[in-house]
Amino acid sequence: MPRRRPRPGPRSSDREPGRRAEQVEEAGDGDWVVRTITGAGTGKTYRCPGCDQEIRPGTPHVVTWPAYARDSDLEPWDTDSAADWRRHWHTTCWRARNRRR
């Protein structure tokens, strides 16, 4: 029986630790790290700060937090330090947040 060749590609040791699919969005209320959640891996219920409704398990949504802590001497893109500000939003609520104020 022939052996299968390993697929070429980055090994887990070649990747940067902790890298996830995130993007930084610039807005009038600051710079925000935005991570899209597919819903397949969620098992908790969250409350959306935009509409104050539940985000049920399995619902696609976004998780956001400030790109850096305000009024601090941290590096500007230190996303780990601002993780305690993380909030789960419905995607449409996140996009409409500036119109609600």
Image (tube, helix red, strand yellow):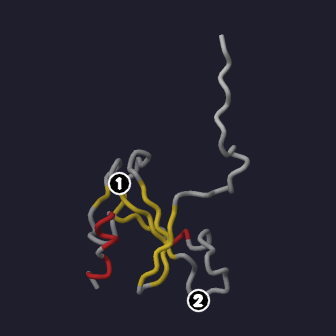
User: Is the residue 30 above or below the residue 61 in the image?
Assistant: below
User: Is the residue 30 above or below the residue 37 in the image?
Assistant: below
User: Is the residue 13 above or below the residue 70 in the image?
Assistant: above
Is label 2 in a helix, a strand or a loop?
loop
Q: Quadrant of the N terminus?
A: top right
First along the sequence among labels 2 and 1: 1
Amino acid carrying mark 1 in the image: Pro
The front one of 78 and 81 is 78
Instruction: Please report the residue visible at 42 percent of the width from the left and 55 percent of the height from the top.
Output: 37
Q: Position of residue 29 (x, y in %)?
A: 42, 85
Side of 21 relative to 72 (left or right): left
Instruction: Please report the residue visible at 36 percent of the width from the left and 65 percent of the height from the top.
Output: 89
Mark 2, residue position:
71
Instruction: Please report the residue visible at 65 percent of the width from the left and 23 percent of the height from the top.
Output: 4
Q: Position of residue 100 (x, y in %)?
A: 26, 81
Crowd rating for badge 1 (residues with CA inside 10 Å; few <14, some 14–19, many 20+):
some
Is label 1 in a helix, a strand or a loop?
loop
Crowd rating for badge 2 (residues with CA inside 10 Å; few <14, some 14–19, many 20+):
few
Mark 1, residue position:
60
Amino acid carrying mark 2 in the image: Asp
Instruction: Please report the residue visible at 61 percent of the width from the left and 76 percent of the height from the top.
Output: 77
The tally of labels here is 2
Q: Quadrant of residue 81?
A: bottom right
Farthest right residue in view: 13
